[in-house]
Amino acid sequence: MRSNHITQYLVSRVRICYHDDGDFFDGNEGHQTILKERTGLKVTFKDVTLSYDGKIDTLKHLNFEIPDGSLVSLLGPSGGGKTTTLNLISGLLPATSGHIYFGDEDVTKKDALARKVGMVFQNYSLYPHLSVRDNIAFPLKMQHVSRKERYAKAEELAKLVHVDDQLDKKPGELSGGQQQRVAIARALAKSPSLLLLDEPLSNLDARLRIEMRQEIRRIQRETGVTTIFVTHDQDEALHISDNIMVLSFGKIQQFSAPDDLYERPSNLFVAKFIGEPVINTLPAETLKADLQGHVPDEIFAKAVTAGLRSEALVPFDNGQGILTTFHATLAYKQKYGREATAALNYNGQTLLSTEMAGLPADQKEGDFFITKAGFFLFDEAGALIFGGEAHDQ
Amino acid sequence: MAKKLSKVIIYVLLSVGAITMLVPFIWMVSTSLKTGPETIKVPPIWIPKVLQWGNYIKAWNAAPFAQYFINSVVVTVVTTVGQLFTSILAAFAFSRLQFYGKNLLFMIFLGTMMIPGEMLIIPNFVTLSKLGMIDHYAALIVPWLASFFTVFTLRQTFQATPDQIYYAAKIDGASDWKYLWTVLVPMSKSTITAVTVLAVIGSWNSFMWPLIATNSENMRTLPVGLQAFTTDSGTTYELLMAASTFVIIPMVILYMFLQKYIIAGISKAGLKG
């Protein structure tokens, strides 16, 4: 139903227009939009540093490029620099040093007003004294678009986000999900080339959150707007994004496709941060005997920490690419719905596995297998030195 | 039972308060309808035998009240609008803009609120007379175009507005100026109404300053005009009270229409700040 509606919208609208100077409509039919097809915008950071107080660098020499038309999530723990990065893109914060480019244009010195991005805030930040219609039309009012035209646009956008039956209400009368939709419509009103979302789903309940993230994904695909999405929820990021940037301690830990993040974490931090349950980590030394001959000696010599995904510990060799075998005792087994986890005791370490559902209930110990996928070795600095597809034979 | 009793006590106390507030008004209206001898009768009469409506006509004609009325309206409107305009700008600066010496300046302004108004009469008079403004509208208006009480009250409300609303407005393409007038001011409607009403009442009722700053008859405002009924040979109370009644009626009407906003505005500024 919902997707139908949006498809209809797109078929009927053909294009959401792109503007250069505040003109949204060609004027002769009021409703008809021509102009250019909207394009996304490439965002480039060159050596961007931000310091709030001049002493501590909150963001340290950030370099990245977000391709146009893509949806990128900024993911990381609280205080990692996600929202700070977003505010640097929006222009709400000036960079301490470095350069920011939108396309080929250097926007470092431009403020939020001049950068013309669309943004959705965590608490939606709708104007409480304005109706939904006026909220969505507000950015157009600021551009002196005539009342008739901006209301027409507001109604279209309200249809796109399914709040067209709420146009005359005040934000206070809407549910959280509806407010969020209105905030998205408002952000899209000026047909921005760049849409920024700052934890837009964190105030919604779990079910609505899943619905809204699909909705955001769809709207993004259909409008082609480059979208940057801040979240601390990895599940959200993994489902919605083309690429994920993991930020922590003011640095980019990894910037890659969602699958790569999980299958080829570039360092120990990312390996631990991504994945549920959390990856098993143990001193590489513990595994020495079992890894002999399976990992090149010169690599193993540098390895400090080993990481094993819980699904990389399997009871049987079903041809899924086994790295090695090991002997362990079973500490306990638990079943939650369709998931079964088991804790294995191995050389004094406890390893969690989610693949032990097929074991006899009374089994106390045995030989288990470690698959190649989901096994990683990290050096002293935490960088990945073994594991991930690139190392697989 | 105890609940009922406490309710009774609350209503009794509120009634006592309400009556205490109302009695002077009732007395004023009652006196305005008496004859001269009735006004000083002991024990006092609450309802005159014959209602002397003619007192109102006599009072209106006793002095150029039409001129006073015009003067009061002009002074009140210009003062209120001017004061609101400067105060909204100042409150915005103190709540949102960053500038050198902001906190120090705010403390100094706050300090000025401790100075009693009477102390300012002489310096203000000297200043305005040197500027040649005495006995003009300017004398009645210019000193009241800024009010730190209004600035302070508005600043508290502005500060309680979430930062993200400001950022959202910035992203939506609103300059500071537009944000102030299209978002912040409408959002602060109840506080602005409250300070407006207080400014109107203050200006309308002010007596001491207009008395000092004006000499000629045609510059006087209504409260000053009430003096016309007090002469060396005594006070004609019935006419004074009749005049007082038509002087305060506009304020009573204003208050009745806006009391909802006044109470909401004051409590909002107080609680949230």
Image (tube, coloured by chain):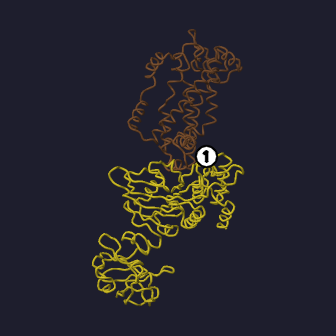
Chain colours: A yellow, B brown
* Nearest to the observer: residue A370 or residue A110: A110
**Circle 1 — which element?**
helix
Describe residue A29's horizontal placement relative to residue A228 as left or right: right
Placement of A154 over or under B67, stated as above or below: below
Residue A63 image position (x, y, % from top left)? 40, 60
* Nearest to the observer: residue B163 or residue B241: B163
* Nearest to the observer: residue B97 or residue A226: A226
Q: Which chain does the residue under circle 1 lie in?
A: A
Describe residue B163's horizontal placement relative to residue A142 as left or right: left
Q: Badge 1 is on which residue?
A: A141
Amino acid carrying mark 1 in the image = Lys
Q: Residue at x 37, y 52 (%)?
A: A51
Residue B158 image position (x, y, % from top left)? 50, 42
Q: Residue at x 33, y 54 (%)?
A: A56
Q: Residues within 10 Å of mark 1 (few under 14, many from 20)?
A: many
Placement of B198 over or under A276, stated as above or below: above
Residue B192 image position (x, y, % from top left)? 55, 37
* Nearest to the observer: residue A141 or residue A366: A141
Placement of A282 over or under A176, stated as above or below: below
